[in-house]
Image (cartoon, rainbow, N blue to C red):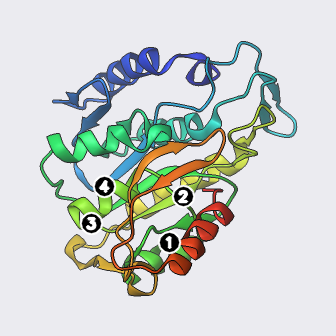
Amino acid sequence: MKKIFTMTAAALSAYIKSVLRNFGYAPQVATGRFIYAPGNLPVMLVAHLDTVHPSPPVNIFHDREEGVMWSPEGLGADDRAGVLAALHVLGYGFRPHVLFCDLEESGGLGAREAVERLSRPDVAFILELDRQGADDYVLYGWRSPELEALLERHGFRRTSGSFSDIAVLCPSWRIPGANLSVGYYCQHTRGEYLRLPELYRTAARVCKMLQELPADPARFSYAKDRRIVDYWDYDYEYYDDMTFNTAVGLVKGASPKKIQNFERSVLKNVQR
């Protein structure tokens, strides 16, 4: 388990490709910025390989009694916890579509390349495993009453967030999706820690949702959330998670006051 956190993004990419082959995934589409493998379930799981830390941690501490992991060098659980959760789901025999992106912390460059290189996947919805805390789910400017009801039935509650790969993927493919908590806290700091029971609880909930997929996955709708995005056409061209500096694209027809309010909203919701 610890090696998921101690590998570089390149080493982790090679490891994941090997694991996917062992799980029977073929073929795979892999570039330097993403790994994609189609599955036999109409759901896609997404996690990202990169972290904000300049190098992987050397010293990792694991309190087995409390189920907590941390490192004085910065654990990088954002988003190695998501990678671990996704592999945990696959380990239980489920075969959803999977997409592992690099460079999420640099503006979702891996997700952007995936959108350019891949055809629209035939899935009902996308679940990203990249949210801090426990029991949260986040949508990024869209609504899907059917997906929201499913998530809430399984114990998740909706909250707000700033950015993750699905903020690129879902609008591009017009597929609903949500970012789910995987148990990390104090992300982007050396004080980051991971509560493993919360990670495993999310993985178990995902497994249960995969077991209960409806016969007609097309019933999961995708629609813009007009309350949020009517005036906005924004893009994270540069996203520095370590310092929370975000260059936001120009807003079409928005007044300076609306721009200022939006920037305040971004800063307020920097937690995923």
Expressed as whole percent of the image width and height from the top left, the position of residue 164 reads: 47, 52
Point out the image quarter for the N terminus: top right
CA separation, marks 2 and 1? 9 Å
Point out the image quarter for the C terminus: bottom right
**Residue in the picture at 61% in, 49% down:** 182
Quarter assignment of residue 120: bottom left
Q: Residue 92: tell me if it is visible.
A: no
CA separation, marks 3 and 1? 16 Å
In the depicted structure, whether residue 64 falls above or below residue 160: above
Look at mark 1 in the image and give the residue it sits on. Answer: 151
Q: Amino acid at mark 1?
A: Leu
Look at mark 4 in the image and give the residue it sits on. Answer: 169
Seen as rendered, the residue at the extreme front is 256
Which tag, 4 or 1, sits closer to the chain's start? Answer: 1
Q: Residues within 10 Å of mark 2 (few under 14, many from 20)?
A: many
Expressed as whole percent of the image width and height from the top left, the position of residue 102 reads: 40, 32
Which tag, 2 or 1, sits closer to the chain's start? Answer: 1
Callout 3 touching callout 1 (CB < 8 Å): no
Expressed as whole percent of the image width and height from the top left, the position of residue 154 reads: 55, 70
Residue 180 image label: 2
In the depicted structure, whether residue 207 falls above or below residue 38: below
Q: Residues within 10 Å of mark 4 (few under 14, many from 20)?
A: many
CA separation, marks 4 and 1? 19 Å
Which tag, 4 or 3, sits closer to the chain's start? Answer: 4
Element type at marker 1?
helix
Q: Is residue 91 left or right of residue 269?
A: left
Element type at marker 3?
loop
Q: Amino acid at mark 2?
A: Leu
Q: Amino acid at mark 3?
A: Ile
Callout 4 touching callout 3 (CB < 8 Å): yes
**Residue in the picture at 68% in, 49% down:** 183
Q: Nearer the viewer, mark 4 or mark 3?
A: 4
